[in-house]
Each structure stands twice: as structure tokens, then as C-alpha cells.
């Protein structure tokens, strides 16, 4: 009986240490987090001013705060014509315009397409991205100020 009680205390201590230890990982502390998933859905209704277009787009990707590296894949379809420019803009919340923060180059100039890119962000760009103050958009000849826009979410 004494052996069972000792074993029981040992198991409880081991379990307690295990439970406490699971909360100590680097990614569990928001101040130490380094990896983020990125997403955004783009359409004309998010542009400022709103564009009455049928084009849409998506952005998926990741951001590594340890290296300041952003990787992303964007898809678009149904544009009024070929994209002429693509950018990440900030700092701006939804419904507010901002200057380009990062130019996207090398994308195919087709009304529907996919492009994958990478870049290294500055600390200021990182702060805007992680606080929800970045959006991406696609410009066309018909809509030179931007045809579709999507607010980037970092999780």
C-alpha cells in the first residue's frame, strides 16, 4: 500500500510538471511568438472608393517574425483586365486608404492568375502587418487606383 501511495505521488508530481511545462513554450507567449499565418479575401467592395466589379482574390501566406520574412500566394479572377500593379498598403484599417508599403512585382498580367512571392519586412512594416493595418490590392487600366482589395489578417 505504501508503494502505491509513493507511486501515486510520483505520477501526480510528474503530471504537474508536465502541465506547467506545456505553458512555457516560446510560441505560447504573444511577446515571443514568431510564426503567423496570413489570409485575406479581396473584392471591389473593400476598395476606397468602392468598385462595382466582379473580380475577387485571395491571399494566403506566412510571416516569420524572427527573420522578418513574408511568404504569400495570391490568386485573382474576374478582373476587368490585366493587372497593372499590385501592392501591400499600410498602415490602414479596413475602409481607409494608405500608400503602398511593399510592391508586388513579377506577377502574370492576366485577368485571372496566381502569384507566389517573398520579401523581408522592416520593423515598422511588421508592426503594421501584425496589428491588422495592411491590405493588398490589384490595379487595372480600368481601375487605376485599385480594383480589388483585401485586408490582411495575421493569426
Image (cartoon, rainbow, N blue to C red):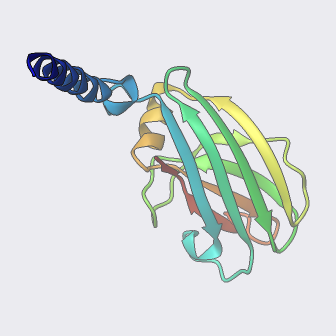
Q: In front here: 19 or 154?
A: 19
* Image x and y of residue 123, in percent: 46, 26
Q: Quadrant of residue 80?
A: bottom right
Residue furthest to the bottom in view is 52
Q: Count how many numbered circles sit on residues in the image.
A: 0
25 up-or-down from 77: above or below: above
44 up-or-down from 62: above or below: below
Q: In front here: 34 or 6?
A: 6
Q: Residue at x 87, y 69 (%)?
A: 81
Q: Quadrant of residue 68?
A: top right
6 up-or-down from 20: above or below: above
* Side of 40 where 19 appears, left or right: left
* Image x and y of residue 54, in percent: 74, 80
* Image x and y of residue 136, in percent: 62, 54
Q: Residue at x 16, y 25 (%)?
A: 8
* Side of 117 where 62 appears, left or right: left
Q: Residue at x 55, y 70 (%)?
A: 46
Q: Residue at x 66, y 83 (%)?
A: 52
Task: Work out which quarter of the rendered image holds the N terminus and state it.
Answer: top left
Amino acid at each position: 500500500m505504501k508503494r502505491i501511495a509513493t507511486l501515486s505521488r510520483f505520477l501526480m508530481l510528474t503530471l504537474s510538471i508536465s502541465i506547467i511545462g506545456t505553458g512555457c513554450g516560446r510560441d505560447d507567449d504573444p511577446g515571443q511568438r514568431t510564426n503567423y499565418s496570413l489570409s485575406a479575401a479581396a473584392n471591389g467592395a473593400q476598395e476606397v472608393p468602392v468598385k462595382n466589379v466582379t473580380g475577387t482574390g485571395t491571399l494566403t501566406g506566412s510571416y516569420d517574425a524572427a527573420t522578418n520574412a513574408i511568404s504569400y500566394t495570391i490568386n485573382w479572377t474576374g478582373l476587368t483586365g490585366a493587372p497593372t500593379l499590385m501592392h501591400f498598403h499600410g498602415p490602414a484599417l479596413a475602409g481607409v486608404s494608405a500608400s503602398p508599403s511593399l510592391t508586388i512585382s513579377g506577377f502574370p498580367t492576366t485577368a485571372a492568375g496566381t502569384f507566389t512571392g517573398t520579401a523581408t519586412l522592416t520593423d515598422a512594416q511588421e508592426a503594421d502587418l501584425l496589428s491588422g493595418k495592411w491590405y493588398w490590392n490589384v490595379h487595372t487600366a480600368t481601375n487605376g487606383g485599385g480594383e480589388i482589395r483585401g485586408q490582411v489578417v495575421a493569426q
